Image: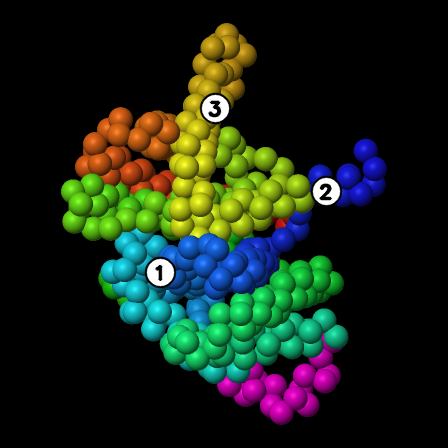
Amino acid sequence: MTHQESRLWREADLSLEVVILLLIGEFLLLFGLLLFRIGTGELPYNPDSTYGLFLIFISLQIISLGKTPLGDLRRSWVVILGGICTAVLGMAACFIPGLLSDPVRIITGLLLVCGGLTLLFRLYIRHGKGDGILVLPGLVRLVIAACIAIYVFSVLAGLITLFPGMVKTVQTAVFLILYGIPYFILALSIRAVERRYPQAETRPDSRREAPPHPRRGLFRLLDESPLGFGPAIALFTGVLLAFLGLLLIPISQGTLPFSPDALYGLLIVITSLQIIFGDTPVGTCTRSWVLVLTGYLCSAVGIFSCIVPGVLTGILQPVLGLVNIIGGVILLARRYSPLLLPPESRSPPAPPVVRELNRILTLINLVAIIFGVSMLIPGIITGTFQGLVIFLYGILLFILARQLDRLEWMRSSLPDPAGPA
């Protein structure tokens, strides 16, 4: 194995913020490239799911990082609930074409314009007329320059969204490509800053302590949420599946339209985000650069499916079905294969909280297999029953998020082995 190949198998050191910024940059770049062929009529276009997917990316930033279109906020439960509401709006636009076309377009445009102007103003207040920026290190200046470019492009993108037709399709395509470039620059700059100026861990999955004076009642929603990345993604996916399960009941009765391409694309994007962090459908793997690149390749497929309907439908549905079936079977086999060993060769009994987690994961794997079979063999179960199964899948993921959060809390409460003896 050459030195270059060995580097690809090393563990990737990308923070959650960098991963999401790269994902948004990928979305804008791919959208711009596809728009050239969409403008000529060579490819179909689903504007509702495109706007919806962008809102979902915003909600991911809010839920996992506390980063809103108007700036960074303390990651309280109120902020997370706001992110969940944004996600539900984006999912509704993705799954039900034509229902929220104008409202979602207007909301997206207003968020871009107001957010860009607000962040530009906050940056101006913080650094004055530029004198404060000149004394900062070069990498930090590059981060600020990329932020300024993103904020300016956001205002322009919001105006184009609010007033469709003001710019030709080809010009919009070029603009989207240029809009995506600062996201890549910002992501790589932040990674360079994190490596050059390592600080105390501040990501959502870091060690945390309970607030000294927890609030009571509804005021607890103002407390900072200790939700880590794993529970946050489980919560987000649970919202998606529970919402989808409820929608499938009227959809199966023909009272609502439905976009399967947006569903498949969104599921692949979420799966790709998990793959980037080493959580693959068949189990946890070392988070190598190869795995990261694989995750971004999968996310490109999901983004394509959301923007361009009808092209990948016949491919993605059986693929997602097989992934759910194979992943569920492999994870069940890994979890219960030790029971086949002689009693003296088995590991000691797990703590009660781990046994409860295993029971939840077992139910999730079984429901995932049923979900996979329903996608692999359409019509094998009724639409109403499929909706109930998917809704149950989402509820189980809510419970999993709570259980993972409990485990992270217990782990963070243990004495730090690096601390004083």
| Residue in the image at 54% along x and 73% along y | 171
Q: Earlier in the sequence, mark 1 or mark 2?
A: 2
Magenta-tinted stretch? 121-137
Q: Which of marks 2 and 3 is nearer the N terminus?
A: 2
| Residue 334 position in % (x across, y down) | 49, 22
Which SS does the magenta portion mostly show? helix
- Foreground pick, 106 / 273: 106
* Disc 3 residue crowd, few under 14, some 14–19, many 20+, Cα 10 Å: some
In this view, the residue in front, 320 or 311, is 311
Percent across and percent down for residue 398 are 33, 44
Q: Name the residue under label 1.
A: 48
Task: Estimate the spatial distance between the alpha carbons at disc 3 and disc 1, rounded to whole Å.
Answer: 36 Å
Tell me the CA gap for discs 1 and 2. 37 Å
Quickly name the residue at label 2. 8
Query: Is residue 406 shown in magenta?
Result: no
Check disc 3 and report the residue beneath it. 330
Q: Which amino acid does label 2 sit on?
A: Leu
Mark 1 falls on what kind of element? helix
Q: Is residue 116 visible?
A: no
- Residue lying at 45% horizontally and 43% vertically, measured from the top left: 312
Across and down, in percent, residue 346 comes to 51, 15
Q: Where is residue 240 in the image (x, y as percent from the top left)?
A: 34, 48
Query: Which of pointers 3 and 1 lies earlier in the amino acid sequence?
Result: 1
